[in-house]
Image (cartoon, coloured by chain):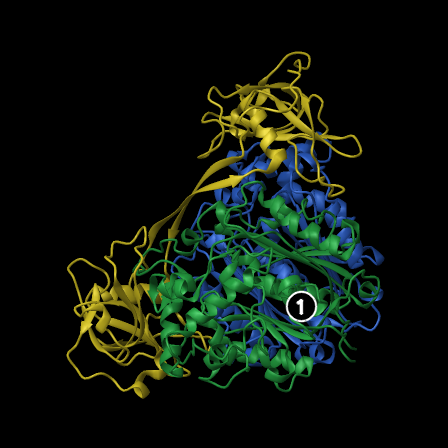
Amino acid sequence: MPEVLKAPLVVEFPFTRSLGPVQSAFLTGLRERVVLGVRTGDDRTLVPPVEYDPVTAEELHDLVEVAATGTVTTWAWNHAPRRGQPLATPFAWVLVRLDGADTALLHALDAPGPDAVRTGMRVRIRWAEERTGAITDIACFEPHDGDPAELTGTTGEFADPVTGIVAPARLDYTYSPGRAQSAYIEALSTRRTVGERCPSCRKVYVPPRGACPTCGVPTAEQVEVGPRGTVTTFCIVNIKAKNLDIEVPYVYAHIALDGAGLALHGRISGIPYDQVRMGLRVEPVWTDGARYPDHYRPAGEPDADYDAYKELL
Amino acid sequence: MTREETPGVRDIAVVAFAQTDVLRTTDELSEVEMLMPVLHSVLDRTGLKTADIGFTCSGSSDYLAGRAFSFTLALDGVGAWPPISESHVETDGAWALYEAWTKLLTGDADTALVYSYGKSSPGSLRDVLTRQLDPYYVAPLWPDSVALAALQAQALIDAGEADESALAAIGTRSRRVATLNSHAQLRGTVPQGDYAVRPLRTGDCPPVGDGAAAVILAAGERARELCSRPAWIRGIDHRIEAHSLGVRDLTDSPSTRLAAEKAGVFERPVDTAELHAPFSAQEIVLRKALRLDDSVRVNLSGGALAANPMMAAGLIRIGEAAARIHRGESDRALGHATSGPCLQQNLVAVLEGDAR
Amino acid sequence: MSKEPVAVVGIGQTKHVAARRDVSIAGLVREAARRALDDAELTWADVDAVVIGKAPDFFEGVMMPELYLADALGAVGKPMLRVHTAGSVGGSTALVAAGLVAARVHGTVLTLAFEKQSESNAMWGLSLPVPFQQPLLAGAGGFFAPHVRAYMRRSGAPDSVGSLVAYKDRRNALKNPYAHLHEHDITLEKVQASPMLWDPIRYSETCPSSDGACAMVLTDRAGAARAPRPPAWMLGGAMRSEPTLFAGKDAVSPQAGKDCAADVYRQAGIGDPRRDIDAVEMYVPFSWYEPMWLENLGFADEGEGWKLTEAGATELDGDLPVNMSGGVLSTNPIGASGMIRFAEAALQVRGQAGEHQVERARRVLGHAYGGGSQFFSMWLVGARPPES
């Protein structure tokens, strides 16, 4: 059995998140070094302020200031910070009930070690030097020996409020296509297209996926198909994709390789795009170092009869 | 929701259960290649074929795979031809079982295939799960799943309901009993290890692994035809709590208690419970919410501390509980599944065997 | 034991737009849910369970967002179930919610589906680079365009049919205050002059990318009796799935779609859909899918669907109006698009569709599909309760 392939897969997006009024006020406040909570109908103050009451589901909007000092309600010592976390040196995760609040906020606490942290300890916000209106405007908490901090007396209305955040998110995966597709890709490296035959319905799957999707049984018997095939249907692509280095227009086609039970997808070239047609007979064109045929080109044969490929669209 | 509250409803049972061995990595297999043997196994146990099944429902997560619509290719393992009546939940398969149970209750189907799978090995699970959190206030801090569980464990310790040695005993017991479970990932003596995030040590945390599970449900007489001792679902219910950890009492699980009440857990004692407690401290929280005393055999499979394939581990709890009834080792068993940070969402099922 | 009849007593939508920059994700779903509850004159406390659906989590970058949305949807302390069946999810979600009522597990269920596409770019979510696969194209249009060409070849339909559908749906959208695209200066010539993106699909024949949510309150017979406005009654509902790609797949008229429709018609006692069904909200993300689905759903014989479109039968004042709301071509918050079809069907039989109301709409079909034309969900709703 050939070696199963593996490759890194990085899933990385910046998400642009609009906030709504309550979250906007809170994050704008952080930018201005002010902490806002929200009052509920039964006079609790929720910090961080949420848009909807977790108990009654009522919409909340009555913002009030709370202190930048508070009390740890529980904690956990993180000796090995991970990517993206608030501090790069060992720190405590803490839930902190700020003075004036009835609920707790999750953040990091900068402390010399676990022995310096306990539930009930007093802490205060350490503000980030550069603040943009995000939860990370709180750099972290730090130990605080004293009374609640003074309120700033803000009205909760700020000039130039933050209405959105950009949240980058990167996750790293190691992708493996599994046994069947690895074997298929391995064969491509010798410029052969090898599918797998279903032991039950006898159809040849290209590319193979390890299972016959209609019979729900494993496939294993390898069958070489092609190299020639028939264009069964296609479209002409006129928009350039951001991450795709193909000049437009080009033809994206379903190609039923001879012997295959269904069509695979490929690009047609070597013929003006507006002369590509259903039934066109094609053959692969390989380029050095590429895993897949670069494209398929006319094979110089008469077109296939519609009846010969109409089940393979 | 219990049968007693809804007169005239059909009796529905788990009639077969199968699971893969749970492994740290299965990178030689695609998802469908991992899943398919379990589907064959569970069908074989009943003699049913895909075409005999009235409804199919699955659970999985795109975020584990790192690909959108990942579940569509898993369907290849089912043999969905001719087309099948089918649905999918983006969460643990226990909720797929719940959806299938409601489908059978309507009478639209007499049998259901439920499956779920998760491959945690391709990504870094601790980081992936941060994407479940409030995207405005919490996710930007990347607090990982072990850290959140550690906050919960410390709250329990502060409340005087546990200490580190009590937590360690839970992991030790789980892996010891898992020696009898050939599918478990961690079995036997496993060192309690260093702190992962204090107060949790590696021994308090579930292994990260890949796996799949499948269950067949059947209604009424069909269940008796397919299984010599069906595990009748006497009640099943699930409840969710507020999302933010800062508004919850982390030492309690009111959603579990409420789901248990609605499922009829407290009407008569259970003899067996399979709890989906990925972290040791969570078993203490769940035992309290479910009022389980020492007379109840808890997690004889080893539970999530021995094998925790994401999206399948909850379904496996129900499957394990049912299998004990099938084998005559239990008469009334509880299966529990959880989802979300620090037990945010919980499902409870009560299963019973016919009197012997 | 017969099933409990299921009634739609509340419907709410957001005004669908390209980017709802004034609300959070929670704010968006809340708006639709609140409107559905207001329509039913119910409060959060009246809801027994919440069933929520959306398309891939990667679109908003929140894994299992129902966890974070529990508070906003009043689900705390209640059952909350999340459905994901690709593009059909909005329909499937409604059917799962209906199942809870039909099974008498719950009396009143809030169901909701959403997508906030402006949080990212749906194209990214759809075209995450998968190692070892050859990148060939981007966007769903390129995936579906070859199937459209196959349909044109099979049916002999003239090129103009696609633009007729787009022109009709965009004009219908002008009568729907919630629709995303309101192209007041639309003309058939403009549709036909718009650039070919994925030949044979033109720009004006494709769906937009929207932020939006749709919610419904479903309830049992007792709940319907208390409803302040006429309910829509579910007369039939079904889901069908087939594999993504397989030897012998008919991507033009998938068997799963035919089987799904047949099941719904059987439940609802529909003998001849063309005669017995008054209007259809079908999932048409690219205009050519209207004639294709007309055939798949049994409203026309194979190869004949385009003739209905060409003859004007599917216009708002035709004898089989299709996509009175403007359809997916005018509004596409992906995860919600299927539920909007179901909700618009219900609005019609309730007589609450406003300017795009079809007169004497007694039985209306809502249809959704997803994946590689492989997941189907449909329901038929009526102005009168099912006979039993």
Q: Decide which of A191, C232 is in the foreground and name it.
A: C232
A184 vs A167, left or right, is left
Q: Is residue C201 above or below residue C182?
A: below
Residue B120, percent from left and from top: 48, 52
User: Which residue appears at 49% of the width and 65% of the height?
Assistant: B35
Q: Decide which of A177, A104 is in the foreground and name it.
A: A104
The mark total stands at 1
Q: Is residue C318 above or below residue C59?
A: below
Residue A120, percent from left and from top: 68, 22
Q: Is residue A243 above or below residue C175?
A: above
User: Which residue appears at 57% of the width and 76% of the height?
Assistant: C318
User: Which residue appears at 80% of the width and 63% of the height?
Assistant: B2
Residue A150, percent from left and from top: 66, 13
Query: In the image, which lettered chain appears green?
Result: C
Residue designated by label 1: C348
- The three-letter code of the residue at mark 1 reads Gln
Query: In the image, which lettered chain appears yellow?
Result: A
How crowded pointer 1 is (Cα within 10 Å; few <14, some 14-19, many 20+) is rated as many
B39 vs B348, left or right, is left
Q: Of all residues shown, which one is farthest toward the top?
A: A146
Residue B328 in view in this figure: no
Residue A290 in view in this figure: yes
Which quadrant: the N terminus of chain C? bottom right
Query: In the image, which lettered chain appears blue?
Result: B
Chain under numbered label 1:
C
Rendered image quadrant of residue A190: bottom left
Helix, strand or loop at disc 1? helix
